[in-house]
Amino acid sequence: MGKKYTYYPGCSSESSGSHLDVSLRAVAPKLGIELEDLNDWNCCGASVAHVEAGALPASALSARNLANARAQGNQDVLTACAACYLKTHHTNEKIRDKPGFKEKINEALGAAGQSYDGDLHVRHACEVIVNDVGLDKIKEQVTNPLEGLKVAGYVGCQTVRPFAGTEGGGDYDTYEDPEFLDDFIRSTGAEAVEFDSKTACCGGAIALMSPDRTLGLIKKILDEAKEKEADCIATPCPLCQQNVEMYQAAVNKEYGTDFQIPVVFYSQLMAVAFGMDVNKDACLDRNFISADVIAQKARK
């Protein structure tokens, strides 16, 4: 039996990032990861909540999730979303380390009859795979190696900053040149192309409000992926996946380019390489741009 984690899916799991959620749930048992859903979870307060409500109310949203998680036990809280991880981990650390902040948060939680002491550990799914699972376990599950598939590993801004190089963040990689995603890609049998844009910013939530301001950032990522002849881009971040794939048509219109590069999640690659159903488990049919090339490269 695998190790159990309290799983916080986050808002994107029910919309634009559903293919991350479904594919992660599909591969988790094969990696010895048992996911127990967080009861009655809510938005973590990332991005717009901070703008509309302010820092403390936004943090209280994450604190409520943590209080609910603590009510379920003392297992680590796992999330796959970069923004959810950033916000939840940061709130947890502040509650643990800053008594004044903890007092204010518990005053807010008290209105709902809750409290939280900061005694859980919030972890990113990729860090869990690196530190608790290991690459050998991934390779053991591969039945359809993705040989011949060239993948640009795009980590994005938030997955490794600011916690990756810290003890609290699992010390699983570096900020400047993370290698975990390339390692995941190679473990599936695919080729990880050299990708200098791996931690470049895609514009984040700004793309949702003012996409015209971020098209140039997205184009730079796509330019390098095309230059390196990547068949697809892989990422761990729901917002990165959405921005870099969904806005390709807008980039093409603005710059006269012809990008049609599928952007997938690492867990989708794993699901295909593990011999799982390409739509039911890997959710390749949920990509905005066809990702059939991945299934075609899988060696049956």
Image: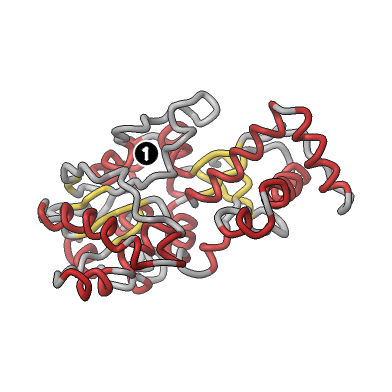
Q: Where's residue 297, x and y in %?
A: 17, 61
Q: Nearest the camera: 280 or 284?
A: 284
| Count of residue discs | 1
Mark 1, residue position? 137
Q: Where's residue 96, x and y in %?
A: 70, 29
Q: Is residue 271 left or right of residue 153?
A: right
The image shows residue 173, relative to residue 41, as above or below, that is: above
The image shows residue 125, relative to residue 241, as above or below, that is: above
Q: Nearest the camera: 233 or 132?
A: 233
Q: Give the farthest residue toward the top.
A: 167
Q: Is residue 36 left or right of residue 295?
A: right
Residue at 57%, 56% in the rendered image? 9
Quadrant that contains the N terminus: top right
Quadrant that contains the C terminus: bottom left
Can residue 290 be seen at all in this image of the molecule?
no
Residue type at mark 1 is Lys
Q: Label 1's element?
A: helix
Residue at 13%, 58% in the rendered image? 226
- Local crowd size for mark 1, using a 10 Å CA cut-off: few (<14), some (14–19), many (≥20): some
Q: Is residue 291 left or right of residue 10?
A: left
The image shows residue 142, relative to residue 90, as above or below, that is: below
